């Protein structure tokens, strides 16, 4: 299962010095934040610290998250110098490499049979950075209290993203399928962000903080493994 890391974002792309960050608030703050969004084609978050829990095991990991706009989302989790999990999401598919158990999971994002997943590629991309939300400003409304609310609800699926009105940090998100009870949810906890889900392989939780953010960098993504050493599981 792909775990997306939401590391604290501040300010606009124009100014990378924290001293120069403008005060972003409400819809006008979102507009200011989005001024340079069209010039950003990739986002790399590296060396984020996280606690990852899945299969009833807990790991302290260093995370790398990379997003190439409208193309691919990539995640790597490393524990004590050893990569334990690698995952990628493309427009039409998800691929997860569990290096501990030597298993590769593959699944189309648009399933041929049964109910769909509670998220699609655009949903997951929107969670990487609020800059990706700039194309969906018409789906946002200001509650004039605490949040900017992005509503992506679909039949049988609740899809909401809430940004704090002041500072525009992502506060919570919820993607929940009412028929299957599959979900991807997250909430901010002081200087970290907790994410939990059950929608693809198994239940997992991840709490992440920190990380270095770099824009418009191209990196090589490798998702191939030795087929003689891994078991392949197709999720339809």
Image (spheres, rainbow, N blue to C red):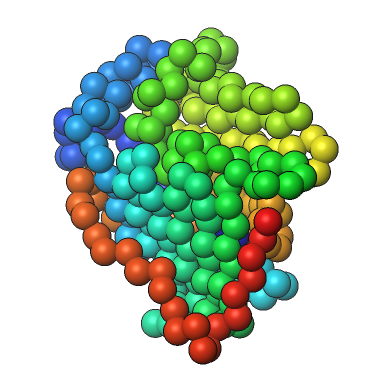
Which of the pair 51/177 is nearer the observer? 177
Report the residue at 71% width, 31% height from top.
157
Quadrant where the image shows the C terminus: bottom right
Q: In the rendered image, is residue 59 in sight?
A: no
Indicate whether 167 appears above or below 173: above
In the image as oriented, which residue stretches furthest toward the front?
A: 112
Residue 116 percent location from the top left of the image: 69, 42
Report the residue at 32% width, 60% height from top.
46
Indicate whether 15 appears above or below 64: above
Residue 7 percent location from the top left of the image: 42, 48
Indicate whether 41 appears above or below 36: below
Residue 95 percent location from the top left of the image: 52, 62
Relative horizontal placement of residue 73, taking residue 144 as reference (left or right): left
Report the residue at 22% width, 46% height from top.
215
Give the quarter of the image for residue 118.
top right
Residue 78 percent location from the top left of the image: 44, 74
Give the quarter of the image for residue 14.
top left
In the image as oriented, which residue stretches furthest toward the right?
A: 179
């Amino acid at each position: 299962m792909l775990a997306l890391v939401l590391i604290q974002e501040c300010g606009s792309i124009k100014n990378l010095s924290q001293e120069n960050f403008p005060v972003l608030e409400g819809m006008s703050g979102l507009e200011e934040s989005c001024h340079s969004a069209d010039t950003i084609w990739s986002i790399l978050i590296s060396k984020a610290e996280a606690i990852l829990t899945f299969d009833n095991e807990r790991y302290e990991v260093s995370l790398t998250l990379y997003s190439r706009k409208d193309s691919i989302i990539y995640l790597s989790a490393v524990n004590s110098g050893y990569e334990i999990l690698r995952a990628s999401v493309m427009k039409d598919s998800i691929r997860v490499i569990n290096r501990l158990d030597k298993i590769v999971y593959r699944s189309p994002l648009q399933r041929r049979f049964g109910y769909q997943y509670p998220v699609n590629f655009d949903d997951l991309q929107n969670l990487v950075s609020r800059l990706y939300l700039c194309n969906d400003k018409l789906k946002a409304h200001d509650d004039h209290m605490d949040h900017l609310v992005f509503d992506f609800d679909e039949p049988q699926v609740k899809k909401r993203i809430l940004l704090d009105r002041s500072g525009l940090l992502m506060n919570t998100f919820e993607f929940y399928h009412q028929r299957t009870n599959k979900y991807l949810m997250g909430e901010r906890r002081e200087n970290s962000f907790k994410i939990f889900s059950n929608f693809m392989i198994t239940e997992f939780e991840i709490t992440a903080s920190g990380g270095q953010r770099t824009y418009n960098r191209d990196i090589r993504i490798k998702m191939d493994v030795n087929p003689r050493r891994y078991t392949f599981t197709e999720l339809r």
